[in-house]
Amino acid sequence: MVGHSLAPQYVRWQVGRNRAQLGRERLDLVLLHNPERAHPGDRPTLHRAMREAFVVLEEAVAAGNVAGYGIATWAGLEEEAFTVGELLALAAEAAGGRHHLVAVQMPVSLVMMTPITQALHGRGPLTAAAGAELRVMASAPLHGGELPGIVDQELADLIRPGLTPAQACILAVASCPGVTNVLLAASGAPHWKEAADAVAQPSLTAAKLREITGVLASP
């Protein structure tokens, strides 16, 4: 099978495969990755396919094999292939009522700032997800490792004096309204500690985030 598939039999097989690989009777969370790529530009077909995939995941929850599910997207929410409200509606249809869609993963960083600026104005997917009490996992907070080489110490000190550029970028994402978790890959224990020390900092205020996004948006 080539590309992204939301076919029910494929989703069912992947859930079973993941349980076997992890040696777990029940998976805590299953994410459909980049579902927007399955049917690009065709929202009705995409939504039907997602609803069918959600049906399989609801069945897995009912069987005790999955605790909850969600989507991990790179561009689906930004390009409005689907909205948070539509995801919730599709999940409710799939479940026939109370659903188990509990999480959304999307990129949030000082490069991909749109979710931050939207959230600061009380709109956008982060605000919608928070309103629905969804777990929101911010991916690519360092934009694939590029940001520490772009952000200088002056900007880092503007964010929070005493932090490294990488820590400042991570803290900005962790402080964004609606974000509950920050996903980060690290090459070793020192980088993990650096990241952990960053998120242990007191969150930035909305006023500080507005100042930072304003500086970055200025020509």
Image (spheres, rainbow, N blue to C red):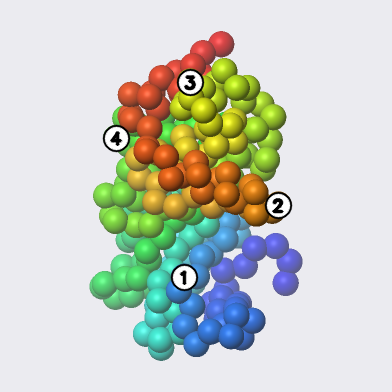
Numbered disc in front, either 1 or 2: 2
Residue at the (53%, 84%) spot, across then down? 24
Mark 3 to mark 1 CA distance (whole Å):
37 Å
Q: Secondary structure at mark 4?
A: loop
Which labelled disc corresponds to residue 158?
A: 3
> Pointers 3 and 1 in contact (CB under 8 A)?
no
Left or right of 40 on screen, residue 145:
right
Q: Is residue 41 visible?
A: no
Q: Secondary structure at mark 2?
A: loop
Q: Quadrant of residue 166?
A: top right
Q: Secondary structure at mark 1?
A: loop
Q: Does label 1 or label 2 sit earlier along the sequence?
A: 1
Q: Quadrant of the C terminus?
A: top right
Residue at the (52%, 57%) spot, across then down? 72
Residue tagged by mark 1? 29
Residue extending farthest to the top is 219
Which labelled disc corresponds to residue 122?
A: 4
